[in-house]
Amino acid sequence: MSLPLVVGVDGSEPSLRAVDWAADEAALRGAPLRVVYASLWERYEGAALAPEIGEPSGHVTAEDILGAAARRARRRHTDLSVTTAVVPEEPEYVLMRESRNATAVIVGHRGRSDLTELLLGSVSLTVATHAHCPVVVLRGSHDNRAAAGRHGRIAVGVAGDAPTAAVRFAQEEARRRGVPLEAVRAWRCPVHDTADHPLLAGHPERLHEERAVRELEAALRDTPPDVKVHRRTVEGPARRVLLAVSHEADLLVVGRRRPQHLGPHLGRVAHTVLHHSGCPVAVVPDLS
């Protein structure tokens, strides 16, 4: 049996929207869904519960929250295998541990908090930084569904000159959904190149763009034949380029750097899109 998709819930509306997305994705993959509630979550996220929980927050139990989440998932897909778990620990540690035996972890962009929705919750950010599997953070318009998104495309930010885990993940997501993959390579022309490199005189940007094209082609060379790919090289900071792309995609996929001697590192690009993306974001660790 395939590994489950794990979704973290805390009773907030964003976490129940994450259940919707996770249920759609699990059905698309033919995978079971595991709904996890960390009972110490309220220490981090305040007390605002989703209306459908149906009780004042002081009277709601962990079982109430899990029951509402499981019912919501089964309403979307009646034949979906759904299991639940209550774990009396801090949520980020629970979800990081769950990620060792999961296909992916799905979380809302923030939990029970009165802070602005433009900010990413600390739990979501921590899990995206340290998980052992891909993490999907539900940002942007929440009517995005795994099977039939509004835009009909998956986007991936290509950061290097070789295939990466993020590219492979995006290719598989596009293939499962039967939609095109938009592969984007941002590039920039450093100002000093114009003066320091005689071959660049007159058109300093040309060689940088050509290199970006080559790197993009190298990253996509193993794309499955049944995946249609739109290739884009765009001049500008990767963070700005990918944020623009996120408003025209149903899922934006970015990579997370290999662990260094200081531990896992999210990177500025992934950090920015997690906070401001216009669509859900998948952060895929490159653990090779």
Image (cartoon, rainbow, N blue to C red):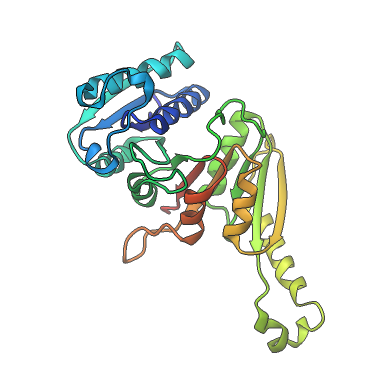
Give the side of residue 127 with respect to residue 231, left or right: left
- Direction from residue 95 to residue 249 in the image, left or right: right
**Residue 228 shown left or right of residue 8 in the figure:** right
Please name the residue shown 73% across and 66% down the image: 209
- Residue closest to the far left: 88
Residue situated in front as seen by the camera: 100 or 186: 186
Q: In this rendering, is residue 114 above or below 36?
A: below
Quadrant location of the C terminus in the rendered image: bottom left
Q: State the image quarter where residue 258 is shown.
A: bottom left
Residue 211, image x and y in percent?
Answer: 69, 67
Q: Quadrant of residue 104?
A: top left
Residue found at the far top of this picture: 78
Which residue is at 48% across, 61% downward?
A: 268
Task: Give me the residue at 33% from left, 45% from top.
Answer: 123
- The quarter of the image holding the N terminus is top left
Residue 273, position as x, y percentages in the image: 52, 51
